[in-house]
Image (cartoon, grey):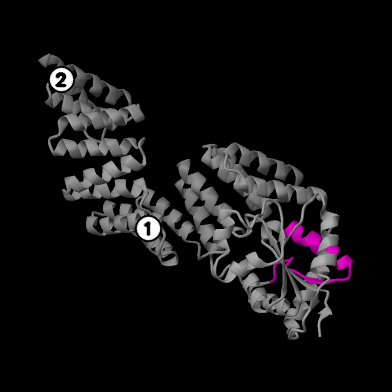
Amino acid sequence: MPRIEKTVFISYRRTNAPWALAISQSLTISGYDVFFDYTSIPSGDFEVSILENIRARAHFLVLLTPSALERCSEPEDWFRREIEEALAQKRNIVPLMLEGFDFSTPKIASQLTGTLAPLKRKNAMTVSVEYYKASIERLQSQFLNVSVYVVIHPAPSPAAQQAAKEEQAAVKAAPKVTEKELTAQGLFERGNAATDLDEQIHFYTEAIRLDSSLFKAFNNRGLALDKKGNLNAAIADYNEALRIKPDEAFPFNNRGIARARKGDLDGAFQDYNEAIRLKHDNPEAFSNRGNALERKGYLDRAISDYDEAIRLNPNYANAFNHRGIARARKGDLDSAINDFDEAIRLKPNDPDALYNRGKACMDKGDIDGAISDFSEAIRLKPDYASAFNNRGIARSDKGDLDGAIQDYTDAIRLKPDHANAFYNRALLWRQKNELGKAISDYHRYLDLGGSGRYDDTEQVQQMIRDLQAEL
């Protein structure tokens, strides 16, 4: 026989905790038996407690924001697993669409595939800050006040029952969620949805102003500041995110990237270590630590980290690319080229992998292959000054002096302080007996601090004197 039940499980992403808490508080006041993982159940008990409490409840509310689905492509993601379990158990699933969520958005549609695809067909409702009270009333009167056919509700184990009691007690003791907190959640989501970096920073800043405990708003604002080149401000935001949540891996990884860009490789290395300690299955942290080790000259250790990143994510193009760089530095050009081949297969439009393969081909004496790769890199990235410079070297090796001079000239146009391009062009001006131009380029090379890469300062100065004597 059909009946009305008032047992509810709330599924949510941690970044949307205020929404989950607010809805739980509202439903509990109305007499619903609500469960959600508010205090973070210990990992050893997590699976049993969560899955048993889904099975023990008739209604399943899933809180949806654009950012909530970001990790649902990972089979072991718990938000995904909760939804899959509710679908499998045929619970009354009610998708609650929060700020900016729309099933028709291409990115969201692409995330709800496979076992998650049925979620798109469920009767969803929008919940907003402005009409929160009306939304909760509608949820209760229309979406939860439905007759559900008798389904088997297996009695939870004592451990799952105890977890439910503890979570409900914590929710009862928690302060009432404020409108400011929920508004901050909406601003955070608007920041995630924005494509302009200044807009992102604006929305995250406003979210933080209303709720200074939003660690992910600090983290994401740090990412936007990093992309704008403001590394000190980015690091300050990552510091604040870690002050709020010191056991979160991603701000450590992100701070490591910013520190590495500032040249603080030791600080970056420590951050990557901590990110890996907290989340040992994160391929990006292993790859980033490999980058730091490579820059410090520890090539074997770097390759080991890239190996682990690739083991964790066999489709990680950047890890293949960087392992290729490390192998090339060790002189293992064949293995390096194999890595670059794989990086290009996985990410065909990556100009850096093409550029790196071009360098390896040139070192092996495959000049035509090098020119082909440099040309493709330039096609994909027309402002790639280093690719122009290296294609110039390859063309010079083939005797195409005019083509090489044009490449060096383009490298200098794109990067006016490209000392090596000035030196390379000077060599060719000298071969073409354009002595005045050669002298000018050698002087520019010295003015830019060029020394040690090809010839030391005294040797270049002597070449200038010799050329002046020939004029």
Q: Quadrant of residue 456?
A: top left
Residue type, mark 1 in image: Leu
Residue 206 lies, with reference to residue 420, above or below; the image says: below
Give the side of residue 321 with respect to residue 98, left or right: left
Mark 2 element type: loop
Residue drawn at x 47%, y 61% as measured from the top left = 283
Residue 420 lies, with reference to residue 22, above or below; the image says: above
- Residue 20 falls within the magenta-colored stretch: yes
Q: Nearer the viewer, residue 142 or 214?
A: 142
x, y percentage for residue 309? 43, 62
Query: Do the residues under discs 2 and 1 have CB atoms within 8 angstroms?
Result: no
Q: Quadrant of residue 51?
A: bottom right
Give the side of residue 88 with respect to residue 338, left or right: right
Mark 1 element type: helix
Name the residue that disc number 1 marks.
346
Residue type, mark 2 in image: Glu
The answer to whether one can see residue 260 in this image is yes
* Tag in front: 2 or 1: 1
Name the residue that disc number 2 marks.
434
x, y percentage for residue 170? 80, 67
Mark 1 burial class by Cα count in 10 Å: few <14, some 14-19, many 20+: some
Quick one: quadrant of the C terminus? Answer: top left
